[in-house]
Amino acid sequence: MELHAIATTTRHRTDCAIVGVYEKGLLSAAAADLDQQLGKPLSRLIKEGDVSGKLGETLLVTVPKGNAARILIVGMGAKDKFGRKQYRKALLAALNAVKKTGSTNATCYLSQETVAATSAYYLGRTSAEVAAHSTYRIPDLKTAKKPAPSPLKTLNIAILGSQERIQAEKGLRHGTGISSGMALTRDLGNLPANICTPTYLAKTAQELARVHRSSLTVRVMDQAAIRKLKMGSFLSVTAGSDQPPRLIVLEYKGGNSKAAPVALVGKGITFDTGGISIKPAAAMDEMKYDMCGAATVLGVFKAVANLKLPINLVGIIATCENMPSGSATKPGDVVKSMSGQTIEILNTDAEGRLVLCDALTYVRRYSPKAVIDIATLTGACVVALGNQYSGLFSNDEDLSSALVQAGKRAEDGAWPMPVDEEYADQLRSNFADMANVGGREAGAITAACFLAKFVEGMKWAHLDIAGTAWISGANKGGTGRPVPLLMDFLINHK
């Protein structure tokens, strides 16, 4: 779908004009203008009770005259509460309705309303993200005939003011780039684990580098290379699987050649049975999403490359399966990490931290100015924060604050959590430098404390996305989070 920000009035010719009505039948400015032009049909619909103004409710009106062949009325809720979240919900409802018509183009006038605590840039960016969300389709493997694509090809976002239009265009461009990364992240998560293997993730990274060969390079290391790096912790996780592991290294160079990069480290467990500490069968299919940290890194790199951001970025993805077999790592085994520290593995289902710790050690060679790891790490984080916020753990207040603010701007929230030494004490072991679990209490925190043992001297943050990377139930699927948060951070990072 093509997206444009245009400075226009309701005299603009379009297949479908999207206008809003607030609660209590209060017309938006564009709706009032159209209503006046056409002899007040919208006012009559409100009077007759066909339009309530409830947020997200829609009504399609075909008009015999005027510049719009159709008018799509969408409820905007209470006028004094109309902010970005309400704008997002109203626009998504409107686009879902417009797609069911024969409209090839539409003009949205909701963006001419006062949207609390936002700007023309963020309205443009939000509009692009909503448009992409409305057209996203899960890469299903069904053999039935696919539904016909929507005829809607162009969406115009009406903006008042020339400077505001310029900012909205920038927002549309950024939103389109971010959405391209989100779509890749969602696609990879939604694919079944027999397709999306460590080798598949590596090939995806290589294809990204082929498309963006001027700015992006990729190196893929096999099991022999990983062993040569002495990543004993990483290799302990893949010991029971027939799928070969991969260490994927991405480098994007868009900034000054001497500038230190930001580093992203992604957990890429393409399927997690729990290993010998096997998981319950119920909902185990969702463990194909245990590589969403890796998928996020790939999505961010695609978005950054598409937008040609003037930054340097490094991505490290440690990817493998966690399977039970005769060769699998056992509870009580002790392994040596790349850092030289030894780990007693008390629970083989706490495997994400075992691949991440070696990846975090590896990233030191790039002397990054900041390191952010992304992982579907703990069910405990879901218990603590639900599906609304990603857990945020950091050893640097400035980095933590920057990520929190990015999450707020992107509407992809992260909630700061402690990483105190008192929690790290739970990881003590009689047989190794540390254990890989610290008991039931504060499970998300002790997992972060484990990772903190491998990032000393680096500015580091950890995003636990176990509750936000996908949704369960009838609409099961990947969300693309936290690509928006990380992209906002990178766009605004100095």
Image: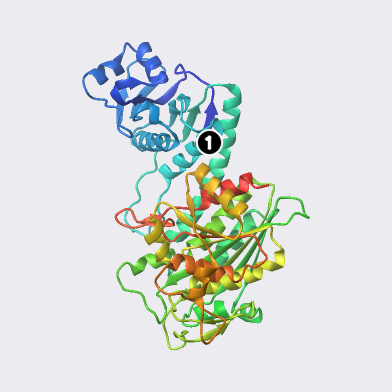
- Dot 1 falls on a residue whose secondary structure is helix
Residue 317 in picture, x, y percent from top left = 57, 66
The residue sitting at 68% across, 47% down in the picture is: 494
The residue positioned 43% from the left and 27% from the top of the image is 110
Q: How many marks?
A: 1
Residue situated in front as seen by the camera: 424 or 50: 424
- Which residue is located at x 55 percent, y 76 percent? 234
Q: Quadrant of residue 206?
A: bottom right
Residue 83 as seen in the image, left or right of residue 202: left
- Which residue is at 52% across, 25% downward? 159
Location of residue 332 with respect to 94 vertically, above or below: below
Q: Which residue is mark 1?
A: 122
Q: Is residue 192 visible?
A: no
Q: Amino acid at mark 1?
A: Tyr
Q: Residues within 10 Å of mark 1 (few under 14, many from 20)?
A: many
Residue 120: horizontal and vertical position, in percent? Answer: 54, 30
